[in-house]
Image (cartoon, rainbow, N blue to C red):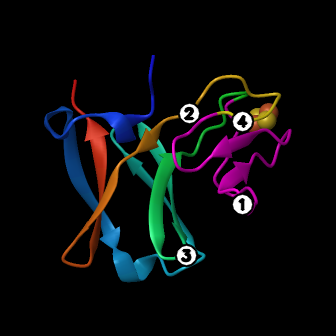
Amino acid sequence: MNVNYTELKAEQIEYVEVAELSEIPNGERLFIEIDEFNLVVFNIADKIFAISDTCSHDDNPLGDGEVNDDLEVICPRHGARFDIKNGKAVSMPATVDIPAFPVRIVDGKVEIGLPLE
Ligand code: FES
């Protein structure tokens, strides 16, 4: 199953407002829960990204992990790396991608795109 929701078409997504852009300054991150999703939203060099906060290796919280220069977040538990842009698992011990969500900014508010059923 493709969990990179950033590749969905507009009609397959419902955008939900989650925060003011000013709440996530450059270099910061925000943890949010919407429906069944636990997300971490990153502001990296004034670009906003949203991925699942759950590591696919052992369901550990992921979003507090360090972010490297390749836009990868490193799981604090066993060190698996995930691409923040698309949720791809790029290093062991994780082999399964995590959800990545489309993001848009509307009138200074951050909106996350959730997949419609
Ligand atoms: S729980 Fe994330 S690498 Fe093991």
Identify whether 91 is placed above or below 70.
above
The first of marks 1 and 4 along the sequence is 1
Q: Name which residue type carries label 2.
A: Ile
- The 10 Å Cα crowd at callout 4, few under 14, some 14 to 19, many 20 or more, is some
Residue 45 marker: 3
Mark 3–mark 1 Cα distance, whole angstroms, equals: 12 Å
Mark 4–mark 2 Cα distance, whole angstroms, equals: 11 Å
Mark 1–mark 4 Cα distance, whole angstroms, equals: 13 Å
The first of marks 3 and 4 along the sequence is 3
Is disc 2 placed on a helix, strand or loop? Answer: loop
Is disc 4 placed on a helix, strand or loop? Answer: loop
Between circles 4 and 2, the one closer to the viewer is 4
Residues marked 3 and 1 touching at CB (< 8 Å): no
Residue 93: x and y in percent read 82, 28
Mark 3–mark 4 Cα distance, whole angstroms, equals: 22 Å
Does any portion of residue 35 appear in the rendered image? Answer: yes
Residue 69: x and y in percent read 73, 63
Viewer-side residue, 44 vs 38:
44
Q: Which residue lies furthest to the front in this view?
A: 70
Q: Residue furthest right?
A: 78
Query: To which residue does mark 1 refer?
Result: 67
Which segment is the magenta one? Answer: 59-88
Query: To which residue does mark 2 refer?
Result: 98
- The 10 Å Cα crowd at callout 1, few under 14, some 14 to 19, many 20 or more, is some
The first of marks 2 and 3 along the sequence is 3
Mark 2–mark 3 Cα distance, whole angstroms, equals: 22 Å
Query: Is residue 98 left or right of 110 when viewed as pictured?
Result: right
Residues marked 4 and 2 touching at CB (< 8 Å): no
